[in-house]
Amino acid sequence: MNFPIIAPSVLSADFANLGRDVEMINNSQADWFHVDVMDGVFVPNISFGFPVIKSIQNLAKKPLDVHLMIVQPERYIKEFKAVGAEILSVHYEACTHLHRTLHAIKEEGMKAGIAINPHTPISLLKDVIRDTDLVCMMSVNPGFGGQKFIEQTYQKCKELRHMIDESGSSCLIEIDGGVNAQTAPLLLAAGAHVLVAGNYVFGSKNPSETIASLKNLQANTTTVA
Ligand code: DX5
Ligand code: ZN
């Protein structure tokens, strides 16, 4: 894999011109589509559901990385597979039987991710780190694009990278929220593999160039202390 992996967040796209924005991502140096699903219960916002994701899949030439900010995500695993999810992340805080849910996602042939809120300590992941393909570490409180980055994330990222390297797991660290030219290099130095960016990409004059500027940052693929 060619790190860093860049995953523009479709949440910040122009939904009246979604096809155009999907094509922009197809033609850019982005690696994945980050697709945020919100139910108005787990987070105080509602985004979009299956028909919109299916429309994205019909045009997308890159994997869909679907981030579920919903309660009881285990109820919809097959449905998200059917609309094209290749990576499916569920929130630690939304799963009573997280281990079972991760394996149910894998049984459907998807990569399984765990998303964690800013208040959730890394230490809670110890017993599932070998069962997960990706940890989506929230660097804002989930629910909205364009929020301020929480600085504590750098330390948590180092801690998580240490846990992954120690465990021998090949789990990737994805950072979601407030990624921009200032935060991205520091996140890569702290051991992040995947950068999600919404507002920074779609709020810029030239989204494709902004994606390239993130992609061309130096990834730190060695162990961090
Ligand atoms: C927040 C979402 C993010 C969001 C990131 O709840 O999970 O993926 O789109 O947006 P920015 O990059 O604007 O902070
Ligand atoms: Zn997200």
Image (cartoon, rainbow, N blue to C red):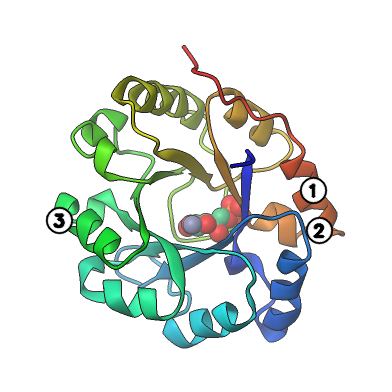
Instruction: Give the crowd class for mark 3: few <14, some 14-19, many >=20 residues within 10 Å.
Output: few
Q: Quadrant of ligand 1?
A: bottom right
Q: Position of residue 169 (x, y in %)?
A: 34, 32
**Are circles 1 and 2 on residues that touch, CB within 8 Å?**
yes
Give the distance between the C-alpha atoms of the residues marked 1 and 2, in whole angstroms.
Answer: 6 Å
Q: From this viewpoint, is residue 146 visible?
A: no
Q: Position of residue 60 (x, y in %)?
A: 63, 74
> What residue is disc 2 on?
208
Callout 2: SS: helix
Secondary structure under badge 3? helix
Label 1 SS? helix
Q: Position of residue 106 (x, y in %)?
A: 28, 59
Residue 27 in view in this figure:
yes
Q: Residue at x 31, y 45 (%)?
A: 132
Residue type marked 2: Ser
Instruction: Check disc 3 and report the residue beneath it.
Output: 100
Q: Where does label 1 land, which residue?
A: 212
